[in-house]
Amino acid sequence: MNLVAHGIGTVQDLPLPFWMLLWGGAVVLVISFLLLGLLWQRPLLAAHERGQGLARGVSRFVLGPLRVAVQLLSVALFGLVWAAALFGDTDPYRNLAPTWVYVIFWLGVPLLSILLGNVWRALSPWRAIADGFVWVRERSGADVQPLAVYPDRLGRWPAAGLLFAFVALELAYSDPSSPRSLAFAIALYTYLALFGMAAFGRDRWEQSGECFAVLFRLFSRIAPLHAEQDRLRVRWPVTGLVGAESVPGSAAFLAVMLGSVLFDGYSRSTTWQNLVSDIEAPYLIDRPGIGELLVTLASIGGLLVGVLLVGSAYLAACAVAQRIVNAPRGLVPDFLRSLVPIAFVYVIAHYFSLFVVQGQFAVPLLSDPLGRGWDLFRTADVLPNLSPIPTVVTQWVQWLALVAGHVAGLTVAHDRAVTIFADKRDALVSQIPFLVLMVLFTMGGMWVLFLS
């Protein structure tokens, strides 16, 4: 998906030499590790997890009338985007759907989630449709119950599979910004989302099968706002990441998120582009369809390799940590949430320029969503600024985001270690493999970002 190129330069125009950026990030992580070991001797995040409750009137308004109004708007926008994809101009630059799906939704909602909490509960059109159906049925006196019990052993594996399918559409399919392809994907996902909610219940399916709800809920744990028992509460950022993530499939889910960004960066490298050319070249003239299919399959394979690399690296770090401190059980669930801020900053660092530049196109496209020459909101003639931020500023944002995200991940992991290990030495030693993991993730993120 390249509505506009979101690479912002090459190693020649970096603000500092690449080796300096690379080692600077590693040094920051090592210093952070030492300071955490010296100053963070007991669990601190759990004490601030709940935070302070906001005024009940504010909570009632936000979680009541405002949420319903946002749900109605989300359904209307959903219908508009789907209609644009199905009936609008086939040129992705003249159709609202590609920009809305891949930029406003895919990049904007994570940002809202880490600022305002689990906003997807109100923004999700599928949840809104299901809520509306249940509301109507209950008003008619019907008893609305799920059709089946969700098997606990499945955990988040369905969500991981659906997230992989979405990123495969975005990164591996030959024409991901095709409005008609998006119309089919939207319709298929809508069927799965509504079927899952009807079969297993709205909350259960959102927690396990609706991949966007799972992802944005994880991101919302970073946010200073959260809702608890119909009350809005404010807390220190990142404190919501305290605790273990023991739901089956959670590791696979986060590996898909991290691995997909890794592959996206690598797929724009000269090495990968040469491989794609070699695969496609023999079929370009006589059988171009075969060439496209082979490239798509190779890209899916590359995406899967990226996911497996990230997942294997995390599992290896957990195995080494368990071995060196003789832990009586596996540590995989305990440190999973330390990957959440890393997953978020990968999105920010990798897609920052795309969001800033291409996001502006949503303004004129909203006035002419189907590409028919309309001007519904008098914004059709708005000309986006294709260079709104200097390249050097973008690159510093990317570098700082990567380093800050990995420091946050290291902090969450350290807090968990001092929670589960009574011996402070074990707590510190157990974090050495995760320090190595964070350094590798940081270097890998910079490599695909600045050198691909």
Image: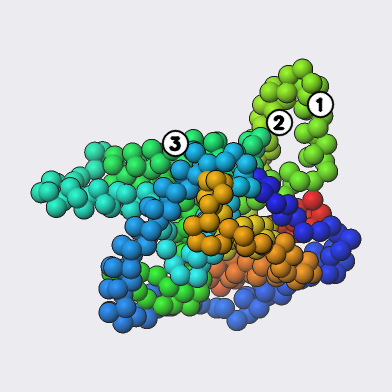
Name the amino acid type tagged 3. Answer: Leu
Would you name the residue on which mark 2 appears?
Answer: 295
Where is 404 relative to 374, above or below?
below
Q: Categorize mark 1 by other alpha carbons within 10 Å: few (<14), some (14-19), many (20+).
A: few
Q: Amino acid at mark 1?
A: Ala
Q: How many marks?
A: 3
**Rendered image quadrant of residue 30:** bottom right
Mark 2 vs mark 3: in front: 3
Q: CA distance from mark 2 to mark 3?
A: 24 Å
Give the side of residue 174 with respect to residue 203, left or right: right
Q: Please identify the residue farthest to the left as the structure is shown.
A: 141
176 vs 243: above or below: above
Q: Amino acid at mark 2?
A: Val
Residue at the spot 67% in from the left edge and 62% down from the top edge: 384
Element type where label 1 sits in the image: helix
Q: Quadrant of residue 123?
A: bottom left
To which residue does mark 1 refer? Answer: 281
